[in-house]
Amino acid sequence: MLTPFTQQGQVDYPALERLVDWYIDHGVKGLFAVCQSSEMFALSLDERVEIARRVVRQAGGRVSVVASGHIADTLEEQAAEVDAMAGTGVDGVVLLTNRLAKAEESDEVWIENMERLLGMLKGEYPLGLYECPYPYKRVISPGIAEYLAAGGRFSFLKDTSCDLENIGMKLRIFQGSGLQLYNANTSTLLKSLEMGAHGYCGVMANFHPQLYVHLLERYQAPEAQKLSDEITVLSLIEKQLYPVNAKYYLAQEGLPMTIQSRVKNAADFTATYADEIQALRRITERMIREYGNS
């Protein structure tokens, strides 16, 4: 999910509530609030908690809601963040894989720190994991995958490896454990679904989620490869001043949303970027007519 801001840079909670409805109306089956697309590293803990609480309330049980906001450096602070997020009523709290060890530290250090963190938490609520690219990307290794599958505490993984070999390894190890893999990468999505991935959890659902819903529901259909090829090329637009461009797209959809951001300068959003988004909307409308509005 994105976080809407007012022109003054404050969280726009009425726009956030409208955004929840927009996602659900466009067919999504779950919401990942307070993530990197939500600009969580630029939100206070109070804002992160309130955003998650509002999303849960607005969703009203129509879809599952998970949230992260687990960004601190020390394990003690992380435990407090995770407990606070769990108190919002989310269906699961998502931990960032890069918060459990430094880039140069081993899997053994990661597992030891995870055990320490789990021991500090005040509840047995469901947990997920996210291979967040910032401040560095820690992709789950075979050793960590085996640890997670054996523990039974985790049910969700947002995979950002963009690597079918790595995805296949995880799916084999996770089989029967209840840990479901959601691919964030469009170009590997179709193949990963064929291999057993559970779904998609990526930034392009902030533009045209209905096309991803169609692919997930019909990934074995004859048109799946054609659709996959098309949305893969369209997904390159995320490199153009995201998330500002996504907020502009949604504003064109009629949502009461500014393009303000705390992680990118909205003033850098040029007329050319706007034209590209308008082109994307026209292409999306044609594709929905071709494939059907799931």
Image: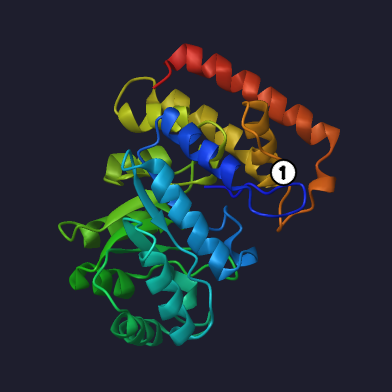
Task: Name the spot of residue 147 as percent of width and height, x first.
Answer: 25, 75
What residue is rendered at 23% in x and 60% in y?
174
When the figure is inspected, residue 144 is found, relative to residue 205, above or below; the finding is: below
Q: Which residue is mark 1?
A: 240
* Label 1 residue SS: loop
User: How many tags in the picture?
Assistant: 1
Quadrant position of residue 253? top right
Task: Name the spot of residue 293 as percent of width and height, x first.
Answer: 43, 18
Q: Quadrant of the C terminus?
A: top left
Which amino acid type is marked by label 1? Gln
Q: Is residue 34 visible to the viewer in this orientation of the structure?
A: no
Q: Nearer the viewer, residue 47 or 166?
A: 47
Is 247 placed left or right of 149 in the picture?
right
Q: Nearer the viewer, residue 87 or 37?
A: 87
Q: Nearer the viewer, residue 173 or 181?
A: 181
What residue is rendered at 43% in x and 16% in y?
291
When the figure is inspected, residue 141 is found, relative to residue 12, above or below; the finding is: below
What residue is rendered at 51% in x and 41% in y?
17
- Identify the residue at the far top of this view: 289
When the figure is inspected, residue 4 is found, relative to residue 75, above or below; the finding is: above
